[in-house]
Amino acid sequence: MIAGAPVKPPVVIKQSHEALWDAFQNNGAEVIDALIEAYMPLAHRALERISMRLPSHIAVDDLLQAALVGLYKAVLDFDSTRGVPFEGYAYPRIRGAILDELRSCDSLSRSKRKRVDQVEQVISEWMKEYGEMPAEEEIAAELGMSIAEFNQLMDEAKPLCSLDAGGVDMKPLHETLADPNGASEEGAHRHDLQRLLRIGFSKLDQREQKILYLYYFEELRLSEIAILFDLTEARISQIHALSVVRLRAVLLDQFPSEFAA
């Protein structure tokens, strides 16, 4: 189902803005503000997508400055001779700047970050031994936690758990998962990544698969998904976070240098 699902591209600017780019190349200082303004919808799109999974105490407006810094740097560094559209070049850099800002002010303690890493390790070792994903109760037991404590950890870890994440030169993981061709500059490597994502996804239960599908491909908010499943938004958030950790466990086993926190 996911493999054939249409993916909405992050590009929301349909104009090419050739005239602005030509003017920028001739006298960048005078037109850079106009270029930034022209591509502001792209920055807002990246911010809106990330803000869908943020806890309520984080002020989205405070992240807009980070998005604009990412856009500004993308304009300065963009090389049109490489044949890559500016939107495709700039979007991951804007997203990366926002995520960097979130990490810098993230309130998740070091001990709880270590706990999230331990969750990934438990899942990885459990799969190697039993060939299947462990249940929440099994993970909690391995960590010496009650199920309530484990669910609280997953709720607090929500900002760290997303398929929107990826390296600055990589498309978000959910797009890699849905891309039927797996085409990229690193063709063989990206094909392996796509294969691993599909394997990891197939090991999730149907509810987890549906939640990830509705969130990343239908772009429903967690509150909307909660209504569909007759669950609280907090519970949907916990299921989403754990599902992403499960997928990360598969990736970390094969690409530890790229997906380690």
Image (cartoon, helix red, strand yellow):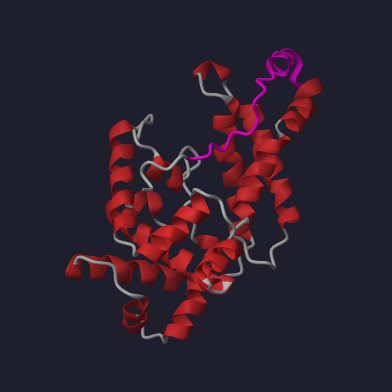
Please identify the residue farthest to the right as the structure is shown.
Answer: 30
- Confirm whether the magenta stretch covers residue 19: yes
Give the image location of residue 99, x and y in percent. 58, 52
Answer yes or no: is residue 125 visible.
Answer: yes
Comparing 82 with 11, the one in front is 11
Identify the residue shown where x is 28% and y is 67%.
133
The quadrant holding residue 204 is: bottom left
Q: Is residue 91 above or below residue 106?
A: above
Residue 28 in the image, given as x and y percentages of width and height? 74, 20
Residue 164 seen in the current view: no
Looking at the picture, does residue 34 appear above or below residue 231? above
- As drawn, is 132 to the left or to the right of 206? left
Residue appearing at x 67%, y 40% in the figure: 43
Q: Which residues are magenta?
A: 7-28
Q: Position of residue 227 (x, y in %)?
A: 57, 67
Image quadrant assignment for residue 130: bottom left
Q: Is residue 178 left or right of residue 68?
A: left
Give the image location of residue 226, x and y in percent.
55, 67
Q: Quadrant of the C terminus?
A: bottom left
Horizontal relation, residue 101 to residue 84: left or right:
right
Nearest to the observer: residue 145 or residue 4: 4
User: Is residue 18 depicted above or below 241 in this figure?
Assistant: above
**Tally of numbered tags:** 0
Q: Does the segment drawn in magenta span residue 96? A: no
Residue at 35% x, 36% y: name it: 180
